[in-house]
Image: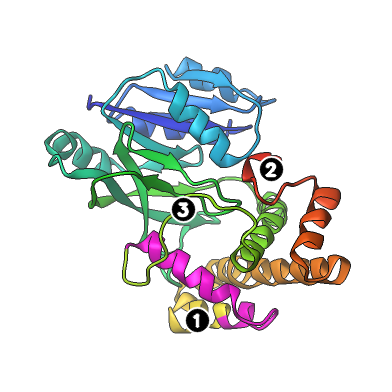
Amino acid sequence: MIDLSVIILTHNESQHIERCIKSLQQVTDKIFIVDSFSSDNTVAIAESLGAVVVQNTWVSYAFQFNFGIDHNPFKTSWLMRMDADEYITHELAVELNNDLANTPADISGFYVKRRVFFMNQWIRRGGYYPIWLLRIWRNGLGICEELWMDEHIKLSAGNTAQLQNDLVDHNLNNLTWWTQKHNNYAIREVIDLLNIKYNFGDKPTVTPNFWGNQEQRTRFLKIKYAGLPLFTRPFLYFIFRYIIKLGFLDGNKGLVWHFLQGFWYRFLVDAKIYEVYQRAGRNKQDIIVHFKTEYGKDLANPNQSVRV
């Protein structure tokens, strides 16, 4: 086993957690789960597989994950971030077992490629593979950004490198669950896009840079996206993904994925922004008051969020 511990956040993940833990046991037995009081048997399954589980009330993703970093009982040299509906491939496990211990001292983190599965199909096109994510870093050098959406691990020192093999994001829930989840995501995305314009609160984040790593480039492009007119940008984004990035080659399931995730969800976000402007106007302070009264959210502090 390598000198690595893994942090996973859970809430009612009985469909996924066994698959996730068993894949990780190829590289480590140090698995730490922060559960936000699941009502199913997630905790029992995890503990039966040797994971250490603590329960903590959900506030926001960043709050919960940084709680996990601070309370991780395993004093390993390396940490890894995983979601419960993900698993690592055997090839990635072999690569970690062979190479992690020999990492040069100047490397503080590793990017891993993520495969996304939807309706049991790998979404290979539309810009969805490879997605590079910083998932492994030296203990003490990484925290989770305090953002409303798309939180990344931010390193305080050192350089990064890329691993050659993949982890897999394969959620087994049905489409109704997926659409409900994304409806809840949409309000967080609204706040994130409005924050680009209004700057509700200064938090340490990944530096936007088109020529940087994938996270920096994504942040740069999101800022540009936020500046486009409402209701036109979902059309432009879908055309880019489905036509220019060849999403149509993913077949019928790919059409469902790219349309729902690349158009319907983005259009819903714009509709919710439009509603904010209609009900609160465009003044920054009025928008802040609107979110406090309508959603109970303090826009300057993502750690006041509620579970979605």
Tell me the kind of residue under disc 3: Thr
In this view, the mark in front (2 or 3): 3
Query: Which residue is at a point 44% across and 20% down the rendered structure image?
Result: 51
> For the C terminus, which image quadrant?
top right
* Residue 3 in the figure: left or right of residue 66: left
- Would you say the residues marked 1 and 3 are in contact, meaning their CB atoms lie under 8 Å apart? no
Q: Which residues are magenta?
A: 213-236
Q: Are marks 1 and 2 in contact (CB under 8 Å)?
A: no
Q: Nearer the viewer, residue 39 or 7?
A: 7
Q: Is residue 108 magenta?
A: no
- Which residue is disc 1 drawn over? 240
**Which residue is at a point 62% across and 65% down the rendered structure image?**
193
Across and down, in percent, residue 201 comes to 61, 53
Q: Answer with mark 1 or mark 3, whichever residue precedes in sequence.
A: 3
Q: Which of the two labelled residues, at mark 1 and mark 2, occupies the earlier sequence position? A: 1
Q: Is residue 227 within the magenta segment?
A: yes
How far apart marks 1 and 3 lie (CA) works out to: 27 Å
Q: Quadrant of the N terminus?
A: top left
Residue 132 percent across, percent down from the top left:
35, 57
| The disc label shown at residue 305, or none | 2
Q: Quick one: SS at disc 1?
A: helix
Q: Which residue is mark 3?
A: 205
Q: Amino acid at mark 2?
A: Ser
Cβ atoms under marks 2 and 3 closer than 8 Å: no
Q: Residue at x 49, y 34 (%)?
A: 66
Residue found at x 32% / y 62%: 213
